[in-house]
Image (tube, coloured by chain):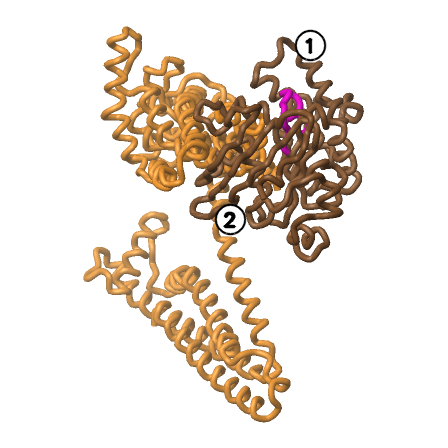
Chain colours: A brown, B orange
């Protein structure tokens, strides 16, 4: 089954997981997941609630470290380096592997300060002009610049939900990550804001490796090239999105996609 | 019969009313049950009828007795003065003394009379007392019977006793909450009244802006220009709002950050209550800790370093100990407001590759700041109203100095000083205590209002 999970790509995998198990205390949340993520393809994780897709996503930038009692086994590499290696600095890892959360979570600061936060703490910029340029570029890439350029110093929390989420994406982009993890980024948004985020994901593809967890199968079909179906903590099937949706190999995948459960 | 005995009698009547009304209601409830099933059941359960009757029997009679207990001594005295035996001196004090003696004789509290006039008055007193007690008994019993009987006649299956009793419960709760509020109003009124008397002797401008505080000499010399309270306000602010806060804010904030962000659940489970125990130490204990341990050590240190004006009672000793006392106020408010910052903020920052301390400094504390400020303001208001520590450790000398090793005094210390011992309540010196109390009350009230506003506004921000 593991062999089936590999998907062809022109470039080598950006991140690879091999035989990953995740435990919360005694409870095993993820068992034996192996998966590759590359720069060219957006990967969607789908599956019913509680199947472990978000948990697995959080292992990719070690956000599970913040949860007491969480434990990860197996190997996850970024450009061939094990990220759970004791030498790996989690701060640097998270600067390379950014994350966008389910609910927009801008800091209670101005729009400008939200985007400038990462470059400042990582010392990526010299001087105000440089920082201004990074902020503008990040907001442009997140498709938010035209909407907010005249009110950069108003609070980020005053934006609409969809704008807040794009602000969070801009904030993640501002530190120039290599991988962006998105944990159900549209679940708190209306359809129009969702469409904008999906469009944005298309535009970001190729520049960043993108992994998106979604509850919405249409969304997975729209935004991703590769889809991984999780069920009960296991990776059931991983393949090219169009094949997963039209011709799944596994019965469980087929049942889920046709709406028999989930 | 004394008022207390009548009250017991009334309560006994209420009990009888309760039992009989309940029995009656239970009887027709049973009758309705056998007759018509659920639809014909009486509106209220039997014990609501019982309570309804008991309340009617007792409440009016007891209210009457309360008013009676208040007014009857005056009525009795009035009756005694109308008797021919009352040939009393006109002068107020002697007259009062004689009447009090006669009352004590009549009530059997004195074995024999000192004055013949009092002995002559005693029988008249006794007669008047007996007559009025008789009137009270009869009136109270009539009220109890009348109320009970009126209520009893209304006990019928369709009578809504439950609604009435609920209303009585609500009234009781309303009265309970009004008592606290009315007490506050009464205290403020008495402060205002006495302060008014003070300000008719001493100009408010001299009081609020004067730089010399020396109430003793004001009495002796007959001068009124030495009630300048600025040194007291300065001492209060210096100790409570400056030195204490310099100690309490950083320590409180840092311990809150540690407890919320770094400490494991097991450590937190015992550290947080242990820290909050600081708030339970009696302030007098802090006071002698400040006066006996901290103050001498600071004085010796100041002398060794060569700081002039070092005294064994110092602003620093009182302020530092007070700061330690209010650490729990600051830390528990800061703890609550840091915990209330959504986890998404913290995750968002950590996911950007921020370290834990960067996250705390740049995201959590700014987001929690309004709550922290609210906590600090509450702590300041607690600190400037604090008395025991400053009485014991800060001293009595009203110095206007910025030297923390010197002795200063505070508003609360001076109030204690002005009101303890034998005092005349019509001298400016004693009345100054009320004026000080009024100013202190206004300051802490304003601080509390601002603090509660800030905290409330902040709570809404994330809901």
At mark 1, the secondary structure is: helix
Residue B261 — which label?
none
On the question of residue B224 being in view, the answer is no
Q: From this viewpoint, which residue is outermost toward the top?
A: B306
Q: Nearer the viewer, residue B183 or A50?
A: A50
- Does residue A173 sit above or below B159 in this rendering? above
Disc 2 is attached to a residue of which chain?
Answer: B
Query: Looking at the picture, how far across and down is residue B383, in whole percent?
Result: 41, 30
Question: From the image, which quarter does the C terminus of chain B lie in?
Answer: top right
Whether residue A61 appears in magenta in the rendering, the answer is no
| Image-based side of A260 in relation to B393, left or right | right
Crowd class of label 2 (few under 14; some 14 to 19; many from 20; radius 10 Å): few
Q: Which residue is mark 2?
A: B181
Q: Residue at x 56, y 82 (%)?
A: B155
Judging by the rendered image, the residue that carries numbered circle 1 is A129
Q: Quadrant of the N terminus of chain B?
A: bottom left
Where residue B333 sits in the image (x, y, percent)? Answer: 47, 36
Residue range corresponding to the magenta coloring: A168-181
Measure the C-alpha gap from mark 2 to mark 1. 59 Å
Residue B171 higher or lower than A7, as above or below: below
Examine the rendering and report whether any part of residue A192 can be seen.
yes
| Residue B172 higher or lower than B251, as above or below | below
User: Secondary structure beneath disc 2?
Assistant: helix
Q: Nearer the viewer, mark 2 or mark 1?
A: 1
**Where is residue A221 drawn, in percent x and y?**
75, 41
Left or right, A153 with respect to A98, comes to right
Which quadrant holds residue B321?
A: top left
Residue at 39% over, 76% down: B12
Task: Give B119 or A119, whichever is nearer the viewer.
Answer: A119
Mark 1 neighbour class, 10 Å CA radius: few under 14, some 14 to 19, many 20 or more: few
- Asked if labels 2 and 1 share a chain, the reply is no
């Amino acid at each position: 089954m593991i062999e089936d999970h590999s998907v062809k790509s022109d470039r080598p995998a950006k991140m690879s997981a091999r035989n990953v198990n995740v435990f919360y205390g005694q409870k095993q949340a993820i068992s034996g997941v192996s998966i590759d993520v590359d720069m060219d393809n957006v990967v969607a994780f789908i599956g019913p609630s509680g199947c472990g897709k978000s948990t697995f996503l959080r292992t990719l930038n070690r956000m599970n470290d913040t949860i007491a009692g969480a434990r990860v086994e197996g190997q996850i590499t970024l450009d061939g380096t094990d990220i759970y290696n004791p030498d790996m600095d989690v701060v640097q890892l998270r600067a390379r592997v950014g994350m966008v959360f389910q609910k927009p979570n801008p800091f209670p600061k101005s729009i400008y300060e939200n985007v400038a936060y990462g470059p400042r703490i990582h010392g990526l910029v010299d001087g105000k002009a440089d920082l201004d340029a990074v902020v503008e570029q990040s907001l442009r890439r997140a498709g938010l610049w035209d909407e907010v350029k005249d009110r950069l110093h108003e609070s980020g929390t005053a934006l609409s939900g969809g704008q807040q989420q794009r602000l969070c994406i801009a904030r993640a982009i501002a530190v120039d990550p290599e991988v962006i993890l998105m944990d159900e980024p549209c679940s708190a948004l209306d359809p129009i804001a969702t469409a904008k985020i999906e469009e944005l994901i298309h535009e970001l593809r190729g520049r960043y490796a993108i992994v998106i967890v979604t509850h919405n199968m249409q969304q997975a079909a729209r935004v991703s090239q590769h889809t991984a179906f999780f069920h009960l903590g296991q990776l059931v099937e991983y393949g090219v999105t169009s094949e997963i949706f039209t011709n799944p190999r596994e019965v469980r995948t087929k049942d889920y996609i046709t709406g028999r459960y989930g | 019969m004394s008022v207390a005995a009548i009250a017991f009698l009334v309560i006994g009547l209420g009990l009888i009313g309760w039992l009989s009304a309940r029995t009656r209601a239970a009887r027709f409830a049973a009758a309705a049950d056998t007759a018509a099933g659920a639809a014909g059941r009486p509106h209220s359960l039997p014990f609501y009828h019982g309570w309804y009757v008991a309340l009617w029997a007792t409440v009016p009679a007891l209210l009457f007795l309360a008013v009676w207990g208040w007014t009857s001594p005056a009525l009795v005295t009035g009756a005694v003065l109308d008797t021919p035996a009352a040939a009393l001196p006109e002068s107020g004090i002697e007259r009062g003394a004689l009447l009090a003696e006669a009352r004590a004789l009549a009530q059997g509290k004195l074995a024999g009379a000192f004055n013949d006039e009092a002995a002559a008055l005693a029988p008249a007193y006794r007669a008047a007392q007996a007559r009025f007690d008789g009137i009270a008994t009869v009136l109270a019993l009539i009220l109890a019977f009348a109320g009970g009987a009126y209520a009893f006649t209304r006990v019928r299956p369709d009578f809504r006793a439950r609604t009435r009793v609920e209303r009585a419960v609500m009234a009781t709760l309303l009265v309970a909450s009004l008592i606290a509020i009315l007490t506050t109003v009464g205290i403020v009124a008495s402060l205002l009244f006495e302060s008014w008397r003070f300000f008719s002797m001493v100009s408010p401008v001299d009081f609020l802006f004067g730089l010399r505080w020396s109430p003793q000499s004001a009495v002796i010399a007959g001068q009124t220009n030495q009630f300048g309270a600025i040194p007291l306000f300065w001492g209060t602010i210096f100790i409570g709002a400056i030195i204490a806060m310099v100690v309490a804010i950083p320590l409180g904030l840092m311990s809150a950050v540690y407890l919320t962000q770094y400490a494991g659940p097991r450590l937190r489970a015992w550290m947080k209550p242990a820290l909050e125990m600081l708030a339970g130490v009696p302030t007098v204990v802090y006071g002698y800790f400040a006066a006996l341990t901290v103050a001498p050590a600071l004085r010796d240190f100041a002398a060794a370093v060569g700081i002039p004006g070092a005294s064994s009672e110092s602003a620093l000793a009182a302020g530092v100990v007070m700061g330690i006392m209010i650490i729990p106020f600051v830390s528990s408010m800061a703890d609550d407001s840091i915990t209330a910052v959504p986890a998404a903020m913290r995750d968002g920052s950590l996911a950007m590759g921020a370290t834990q301390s960067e996250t705390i400094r740049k995201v959590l504390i700014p987001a929690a700041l309004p709550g922290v400020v609210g906590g600090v303001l509450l702590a300041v208001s607690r600190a400037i109203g604090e008395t025991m520590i400053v009485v014991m450790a800060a001293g009595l000398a009203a110095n206007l100095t910025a030297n923390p090793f010197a002795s200063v005094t505070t508003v609360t210390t001076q109030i204690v000083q002005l009101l303890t011992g034998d005092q005349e309540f019509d001298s400016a010196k004693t009345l100054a205590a009320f004026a000080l109390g009024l100013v202190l009350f206004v300051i802490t009230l304003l601080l509390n209002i601002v603090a509660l506003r800030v905290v409330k506004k902040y709570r809404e921000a994330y809901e």
